[in-house]
Amino acid sequence: MIVITGATGALGGATVDHLLERIPADRIAVSVRDTAKAWHLADRGVRVRQGSYHDPDALRNSFEGAEQILLVSQNDPDSDGITLHRNAIEAATAVGAKRILYTSHQNVRTDSPFPPAAEHAGTEALLARSGLAWTSLRNGFYSHSLDWLLGPWQQTGVIAAPADGPASWTARADVAEAAAIILTTHPQDGPITLTAQHAVTFADIATTATQLTGHTITRVILDDDRWLTDRIAAGTPEHLARMLLTFFHAARNGHFAHTDPLLTELLGRSPHTITDLLTNRITA
Ligand SMILES: NC(=O)c1ccc[n+]([C@@H]2O[C@H](COP(=O)([O-])OP(=O)(O)OC[C@H]3O[C@@H](n4cnc5c(N)ncnc54)[C@H](OP(=O)(O)O)[C@@H]3O)[C@@H](O)[C@H]2O)c1
């Protein structure tokens, strides 16, 4: 059996959808914090179990019978993610699971200005010491995050943001499909990097947006402090604005520039592109 955590979230939920196209529903279970949000999965024959990374006993029960577990990384910046993920790895070990897939981030390193990188690095170290087979999905930066980073360019005609660097913006939907493929037919070992085929800068995105809209979209580089002040004044909570700023600090040092062909190989098609994302936003 395959147990999917975070199945009431976007990536976990989409992975279950892809699994249902590949294997019988009775080989799939989900471990979710709130089972009431997962009745649509129960209706499709998936076993719905209650589990939280904060509750080792419930987690163990929810992992019962698991051969493989997709461990979706927790997303609360105020929680100690490494401790929570340790709870999940220990629960997986206790029930005799054979393999954990963990949703990590591209270019995991402990010295990154982007805080989730250290949490992922710490979790990967735990996985490496766990004695279980493990796969770390080092996913490219999710392309929909651009909605928070580019600002209201469709209204203003300007992408005003701090200096950036190339990033291999990757569609979360593609990563979910790849996760289902790895879980069912193409097992992978250790850290693997799943990204779109090309890395682009905000200047490249402005050029593409200009071509797609027929209007000039200009890239303007803002000083970090000016951008932060503007974002907070526009209503972004300060801790979130500061977190978003760390993207620029890491990107301008090339942390998200790497691309890898594996996602294309697993999907058997080209992953979604920035042109796809912008077209979607323009026609929405
Ligand atoms: N590569 C990137 O650019 C990028 C960007 C953003 C996030 N991420 C990471 O990728 C993960 C999946 O992304 P997503 O878009 O699917 O996020 P999402 O929609 O917010 O889903 C996160 C899931 O994790 C579950 N979760 C959070 N804390 C938990 C805990 N303590 N115990 C059990 N379950 C917990 C949530 O449960 P509920 O449904 O109960 O809330 C939710 O189902 C995120 O959690 C984050 O770590 C990566």
Image: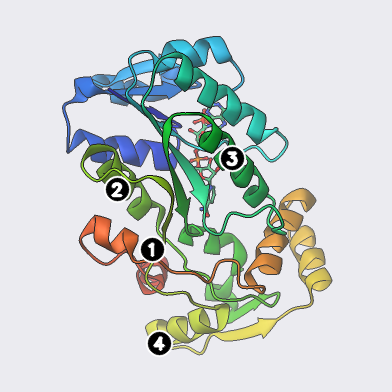
Q: Which residue is mark 1?
A: 284
* Quadrant in which the C terminus appears: bottom left
Q: Measure how far apart labels 1 and 4 are at the Cα level.
A: 17 Å
Residue sitting at x 30%, y 25%: 41
Relative depth, front residue between 117 and 45: 117
Which tag, 1 or 4, sits closer to the chain's start?
Answer: 4
Residue 124 marker: none
Cβ atoms at labels 1 and 3 below 8 Å apart: no
Q: Measure how far apart labels 1 and 2 are at the Cα level.
A: 23 Å
Q: Residues within 10 Å of mark 4 (few under 14, many from 20)?
A: few
Cβ atoms at labels 3 and 2 below 8 Å apart: no
Q: Comparing marks 1 and 4, which lies closer to the viewer?
A: 4
Q: Measure how far apart labels 1 and 3 are at the Cα level.
A: 42 Å
SS class, disc 1: loop
Q: Measure how far apart labels 4 and 3 are at the Cα level.
A: 44 Å
Residue 228, percent across and down?
78, 64
Q: Which amino acid lies under the numbered mark 3 shown in the image of this protein?
A: Ala
Which tag, 1 or 2, sits closer to the chain's start?
Answer: 2
Residue 222, percent across and down?
74, 78
Residue sitting at x 38%, y 82%: 212
Q: Which amino acid lies under the numbered mark 2 shown in the image of this protein?
A: Glu
Q: Which residue is mark 3?
A: 125
Q: Which residue is mark 2?
A: 177
Q: Which amino acid lies under the numbered mark 1 shown in the image of this protein?
A: Ala
The answer to whether residue 5 is above or below residue 283 is above
Residue 192, percent across and down?
42, 53
On the question of residue 252 being in view, the answer is yes
Q: Which quarter of the picture shows residue 282?
A: bottom left
Decide if residue 183 is on the left or right side of residue 250: left
Q: Which residue is mark 4?
A: 211
